[in-house]
Image (cartoon, rainbow, N blue to C red):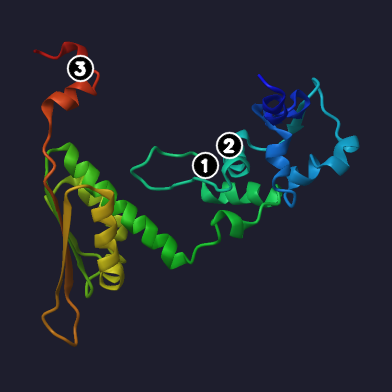
């Protein structure tokens, strides 16, 4: 390797280990000092080197939650926190509140990471959309290709789901009181979101209002043309080795 290549390599003494509640993260000092206004950026800055007291040579202990610190390191490495709460994603044990607590502790600007406090209606809207996504996934697992959900305005405790499956009713039930509001207010945006999330999916929204002065029911119809590929499903399951050729 030429001299120029050597100069581009981080120095060995710049590599540090952050022991956060027993979980160790290895990084370079320069990764942290790239954000000088944050807690770690200031701590490992050149002017504070004499104040550092590592143990085991280059290891520093922080009595914080190592699970959540994964997202803090993500910020230092990428400039953003990639946290998603969608119900159809892998279930995360880290909550938004926990991340925000660590963001504040490590003096990272909430504006920089896009995790500002959500309006309560926006928060519930996200949960409503997640519920619809979960319904699609669950219906797919039993071979269904269409879902129809009806929310009533004049009787918010009444809702209808077709096909009439217990698992779908249980998923929709917590949103019986707000379903009409969200579909009437944000229906078109919800349709576009679902079409983006699921390939081959189509949505239809119908407001079944019989009396102009008395809103009635709103219907969301979701369908998809995804066919079950038996060979693919078997190949990706625990039954793959027993597949009959």
- Residue indicated by mark 3: 239
Which residue in the structure is indicated by mark 1?
Answer: 94
Q: CA distance from mark 3 to mark 1?
A: 32 Å
Mark with earlier residue (3, 1): 1
Describe the element under mark 1 as helix, strand or loop. Answer: loop
Q: Position of residue 1 (x, y in %)?
A: 66, 19
Between 202 and 239, the one nearer to me in the picture: 202
- Give how far across and how far down residue 177 sits, in percent: 30, 66
Verify CB contact (< 8 Å) between mark 1 and mark 2.
yes
Task: Write the residue at 30% across / 73% down.
Answer: 185
Residue in the image at 15% along x and 46% along y: 165
- Mark 1 or 2, closer to the camera: 2
Q: Secondary structure at mark 3?
A: loop
Between disc 3 and disc 2, whose residue precedes?
A: 2
Quadrant in the picture for the C terminus: top left
**In the rendered view, does 170 fall on the left or right side of 32?**
left
Q: Residue 40 location in percent, x, y?
A: 74, 42
Residue 118 higher or lower than 244, as above or below: below
Nearer the observer, 167 or 96: 96
Tell me which corner region of the image, top left, top right, bottom left or bottom right, holds residue 210: bottom left
């Amino acid at each position: 390797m030429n001299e120029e290549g050597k100069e581009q390599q981080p120095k060995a003494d710049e590599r540090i280990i952050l022991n956060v509640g027993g979980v160790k993260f290895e990084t370079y000092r320069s990764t942290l000092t790239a954000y000088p206004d944050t807690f770690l950026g200031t701590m490992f800055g050149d002017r504070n080197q004499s104040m550092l007291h590592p143990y085991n040579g280059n290891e520093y202990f922080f009595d914080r939650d190592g699970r959540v610190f994964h997202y803090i390191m993500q910020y230092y490495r990428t400039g953003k926190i990639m946290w998603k709460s969608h119900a159809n994603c892998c279930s995360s044990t880290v909550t938004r509140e926990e991340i925000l607590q660590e963001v504040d502790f490590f003096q990272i600007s909430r504006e920089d990471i896009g995790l500002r406090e959500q309006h309560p209606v926006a928060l519930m809207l996200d949960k409503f959309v997640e519920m619809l996504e979960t319904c699609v996934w669950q219906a797919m697992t039993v071979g269904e290709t269409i879902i129809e959900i009806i929310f009533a305005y004049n009787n918010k405790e009444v809702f209808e789901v077709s096909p009439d499956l217990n698992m779908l009713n249980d998923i929709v039930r917590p949103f019986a009181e707000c379903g009409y509001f969200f579909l009437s207010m944000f229906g078109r945006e919800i349709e576009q979101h679902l079409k983006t999330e699921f390939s081959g999916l189509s949505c239809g929204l119908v407001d079944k209002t019989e009396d102009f002065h008395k809103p009635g029911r709103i219907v969301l119809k979701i369908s998809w043309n995804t066919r079950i590929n038996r060979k693919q499903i078997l190949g990706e399951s625990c039954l793959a080795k027993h597949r009959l050729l």
